[in-house]
Every structure is written in C-alpha cells, then in structure tokens.
Amino acid sequence: MEILNALALFTNFVGLPALAYGSQLALGALGVTLIYAVLRFTFFAHGDLMAFGTMVVVLATWGLQAMGVGLGPLPTALLALPAGIAAAAGFTLLSDRWVFAFYRRQKAKPVVFMIASVGVMFLLNGIVRIVIGPDDQRFADGERFLFTVGDFRDWSGLDEGVAFRSTQALTIVAAVIAMAALFWFLQRTRMGKAMRAYSDEEDLALLSGVDPAKVVRTAWILAAALATLAGVLYGLDKSFKPFTYFQLLLPIFASAILGGIGNPVGAVVGAYIVAFSEVMVTYAYRKFAGYLLPEGAMPEGLLQLLSTDYKFAVSFVILVVVLLARPTGIFRGKVI
Amino acid sequence: MKPAQLAAALAMGASALAMAAPAQAEDVKIGVLLGYTGPIESLTPGMADSAELAMTEVNNAGGVLEGDMLVPVRADSTCIDAAAASAAAERLVTSEGAKAIMGADCSGVTIATLNNVAVPNGVVMISPSATSPALSSIEDGGFFFRTAPSDARQGAVLAEVLADKGVTEIAVTYTNNDYGKGLADSFQAAFEEKGGKVLLSAAHEDGKADYSAEVGALSATGAEHLAVFGYADQGGVGIIRASVDSGAFEKFVLGDGMFAESLIEAIGDDLNGTIGSVPWSEGEGADAFVAAAEAAGVDPDGSFRRESYDAAALIALAMQAAGSTDPKVFKDSVMDVANAPGEKILPGELAKALQILKDGGDVDYVGATNVELIGPGEAAGTYREYEVKDGAYETIGFR
C-alpha cells in the first residue's frame, strides 16, 4: 500500500507532467533536427515560430468560440490548428525565399545561416508581440480532466491521488501520432527518402535527380507544422506567453543535441531525457521517501536537489556535458 | 501690425499676466501613479476612480485655497518595473508639474519612485497600497505617507486567524519581490511566535506558464494549508490552479494581493473554504464611502479603493491646512489633518472639512478607512478576515 502511494505521488508530480512536457519538447526538437539535417544550420527562430503558429491558432480559436463552434469535450484549438500550421508554413517559406535562399546561393558558412536565423527570430518576436501582446493567454476549453485526484482516490482507495488532465492526455496522444506519421513519411514515401538522401550525401542525391528546392520546401513545411503543434499543445497544457516560448529554445536545443542533431529518433529520446531530468532534479522527494522508509523516518529536509527556479540550469548542464563528452549525441548525429 | 491687432495682442498679454498672478485660481496637478498594466491591472482602475472621486468632490466644493482645482494625471507604475515606474513619476513631476502623487501601488516600485523621484524633487507621495515593512524605515524626508498598513501587521493578523483555527503547520509561497518577501517574513515571525511551524517558505516567479514544479516542492512538506502571498492576476493564480489540478492542496490562506473577483472566476468552486485577509474597514466611514461612491457611479467594492480615496482626500486637506500647494510646505500638515484633534470628517464631507480649515479650525480625517497615521506616517490598519463560500467572498470579521 505504501509503495502504491509512493508510486501514485510520483506519477502525479513527476511521471505525467514530465511525459507531457517531454512530448512537447520532442515535437519541437524534431523540427530543429529536420532543419539541421536538410539545411545544415541550427534554426534559432524555432521557439518564436512556435509562438507565431500558436498565436494564429489562439486568434482562430477565439473566432470559432465567438461563432459558437466547438468540439465538445476536446479543445476548440484542434479545429483551428490547420490555420496556424498554414500561417507558420507560409512564414517559413517566405523567410526562406527572402533570407536563407540568398545565403544558399552565396554558399555561406553554417554560422552565417545561424546568425541570419537569429535575425528572423527577432522579427518573429516583434510580430507576435505586436499582434497578440506579451501577456498570458489561455485558450483551452472543453473537459479539463480525464480523471481528477478525487476520482482516483475514490477508485483506488489510496491516500495519494493522480490527476490526469485532458490536455496532458491530448499532448501525449497527439505527439505519438505526429511522430509516427513523420517516421512513416521519412521511411516509406518517395519524398521522405529523398530528404534522407539529401541529408546524408547532398552531391550524390542531386546526381540521382533529387530536386533540392522541393526538399528544402518540404523540410520548412514539416518544421512549421511540428512547431505549431508543439506550441499549441504546450499552450493548451500550460498557457501561451510569447516569452516562455522563446525560453523553450534552450531545452529544445538540449534535446536535439543530446539525441544527436539531425537524427529524428535522437530528438525524441533526447526530449524525454531532458524533460524527465528537469522535473526529477527539481522535485522534492520528502513525502515520496516518507512512504518508502519505515514509519517515523520521514526526513526533516525536503530532499530536493535543486530549487525549481534553476530548472533551466538542468538543460544547460546537459547541453554542456554532451558537447564536451560526446558531441555527436546518443545516436551519432552530426557534429555542430 | 494694425493698431486694432496691437491692442488685441496687448489685451491678451495682459490677461495672460493676470492669470499667472499668484492670487488667482490655478490648476493643481495630482499624479495618480498606479499599475494600469501588470500584475494588479484588474485592481487599479477602481483605485484610480476612487482617488479621482475625492478630487472631484473637492473641486465641486470650490477647490482648495483660492479656488484651485485639482487635476488628476494618470501614469502607469506597472507594479513591477522600477525603471518604468520611475520614468512615469519623473514625467509627472517634471513635465506635468504634479504637486503630489497618489501612489505608487506595489511596494517595489513605490520604494524606487520615492528614492528616485519624490524625495529628490520634493514631492509628496501618499500610497494607498504599498504595504512592505521596508517602507516604515525608509529615508523619506517627510514626503512619504501611506493609507495602507504595513504588512508587519497583516502577517500578525493572518497568524492570529490561523492560530484561532488551530492550524499549526503551513507551507508558504510568495511572489519574489519586496511585497511578497516582506509579508512572508512578517507572517512567519508572527506564526512561529504563536507556536506554529512554517515548513517551507519558497518564492515563486511571476509570469511563468506552469507552476506544477513549485507546487510539487511545496506539497512535499506534507502541510495541509498553503499560504499564497502573491498576485491574483499573476503567479498567485498559477500556483492555486496547479495545486488544485494536482490535488496538492485544498486549503489556501491568501494575502491581500490575492483578493480579487478574477481569482474566483479563474478557479471556481475549488476555491471554496479559502481564508484570507485584506485591509478593509467598517462602520460609518466605510458606509459613507459606499454611499458617496455609488452616487458618483463608482463601484465601491474592491481592494484599496477606500485607501485610494483617503490618500487623495488627505492631499487636498493638507494643502488647505497648510495654505499652500507647495509640497515642501504642505507635507507637514498631512499628519495634522489625518489625526486628532479636530472635527471628524467622513467621506462625502470634504466640503465641510475644507470650510473648517479655511476658517482656521482643525479636522481629524476619519475617511473610509478610519485613517489614523502612526509612526513614520502609515495607517494603523483594520483587516477584513474573509472566507470563500459558494463562490463569493464572505466576511468573517474584522481585526
């Protein structure tokens, strides 16, 4: 019984939140990794691209809500998702035509692309703040919980409860579907194979008749779709605030690099490792230990390794250690 | 220039000269420096309306001194950005020429504007809501007053409330600024004096998307009650939402910054059973304020509206009592008009007060909050103890 209580506590405060957060990071990291694989530079505007796509979804959601259109128990934002993806994809294609295509013709070094992407980031930053403002926006509607703490306690008879928010469930399900679809696309379709070929050996791929313009376009559209989906899921689960999305860049980069940048499987694994590290290192284990230790041995201290204020430090440390010890990441990605 | 035009120009010049003469009525600008944007933006419009209500009342009674009209000038303190608040106050003082400032609201920006603008320029500031204990001992040159009590008092009140309910263990989280830290510290000191134990006192940052990690740490203490000393529109509501969602806490104890209708709207039924305190007042003064506010179409119900009215009224009465709109002169009259001896003055009776002062009499401004300025010029303070029942704030008593 005590062990079950400890398990429920852990699931409620670590397991489910980290799983949802990891899924959001994974979608973001997949976008970064795709751009890196095809275009060979780290796209710094990814966090703000998430914010841009999500902003369009939020506005469309408000429009739908005003018209009284909804999805019942599911959030209306899902209905507005295509609009956000279209807007984000449109933006990336335009920025590619106006900014990155120029540097490709110049055969510029990756670092030049990276700095140009920082410029695009500031542009997006400004657009989002002008259109929707810097404040918190909540746009989640529909059922809030699959089951609440109270439901779980009544059902299980345990002291500790587990709450499963519908946005957490939605995040996990949507992320799994999106990842499966992406891997199917990369492994099975002609275009996916062309992209992988272009990424592995550009010259050989071009000789075999791969159209580079098409590959680049597809990569941008996929990255925009993944970014918007990640942003919307994060916003539904937590809340939408442009600055928070900008800050997400760090854990997303840490995930992509930890898994091996340019490697999609690595991005997913890296994202879950980063998410679980962040949550587990900052969780206070006092109550958890209290259930497992013998009666009356509940420790005085909180058993917390790091204050929650230092959550981002965890991503930083992971990033630094990986770059020092194994720059290719877990799955042997490319070296930045 | 034709003779007729010349004559007209001369006449205009003469009238301009006449207007500048000291004996003539002039506009006296009063800054209303509150956070119209930022973490307490839902509270401030009502506060500004109440302060302006007092000024309108003074103007309707013929203004101060020789019929000088009070003109409110609003400026945004942002509540949290000290640089922006100082710039706004600087504008009020140097380009608008404000003689006094009704504000600022949050403690951090109040300390900043007082140090950077009010004291160097010699302008009176009366804050309706800055409650940090640090403001009691600040070097203010006699220019700073507040109609809100220090949080040292609120901490003691909350500790008493909890002790009466038999609560002995609690976890505390506060917004990471002068207000939150000051209240958390004074609460902890008072609670421990009563034999209680604060298991964890942790700061939270405002403006985060997700507070589940903070709540996880707080709940690991095993405390049943969580005290939240934050803002209703910011991290405070995030902490409560995350607590309710994860089932970490069901019983909340709230500081004054959390008292807002928006909190009940955001959380709903899960907030029932929450207790808290907010500076409040009852009795004749409070009733008179409600009547005066409703007559003027201002909603009297809300945090710090009474204090705002009183702050503005004190500025006007002090000017009249000193016979000058120069802040360096009338700053010395603020305590005189606020405290005994003298004729007691309730909201809506400002005309009477001005007349008494004109005739050389003495007033004791009671106002909406039973104003009694103590020590360095701050309110002694009465607090309303409330409990949330069926989605509404219900008064338990006053302390």
Image (cartoon, helix red, strand yellow):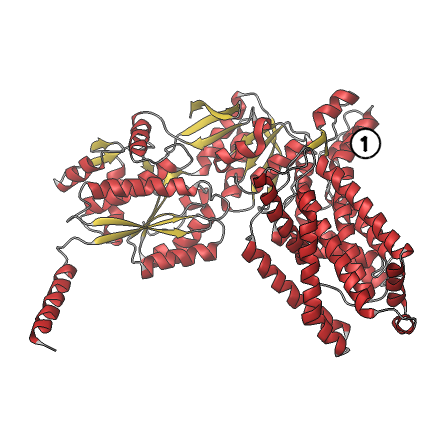
Residue drawn at point x = 78 percent, y = 35 percent? A11
**Label 1 is placed on what type of residue?**
Leu
Residue B219: x and y in percent read 68, 33
Label 1 neighbourhood size at 10 Å, few (<14), some (14-19), many (20+)? some
Report if residue B269 is visible in the image.
Answer: yes
Between residue A309 and residue A162, name the one nearer to us: A162
User: Is residue B255 found left or right of B103 in the rendered image?
Assistant: right
Residue B227, given in percent of the width and then of the height, sits at 57, 33
Judged left or right of residue B157, residue A203 is: right
Q: Position of residue B61 (x, y in %)?
A: 19, 40
Residue A162, percent from left and from top:
75, 30
Relative to residue A299, is residue B123 depicted above or below? Answer: below
Residue B123 image-quadrant placement: bottom left
Q: Is residue A176 above or below residue A316?
A: above
Label 1 sits on residue: A7
Instruction: Identify the image quadrant of the N terminus of chain B.
Output: bottom left
Q: Quadrant of residue B266?
A: top right
Between B342 and B175, the one lying in front of the other is B175
Image quarter of the C terminus of chain B: top left
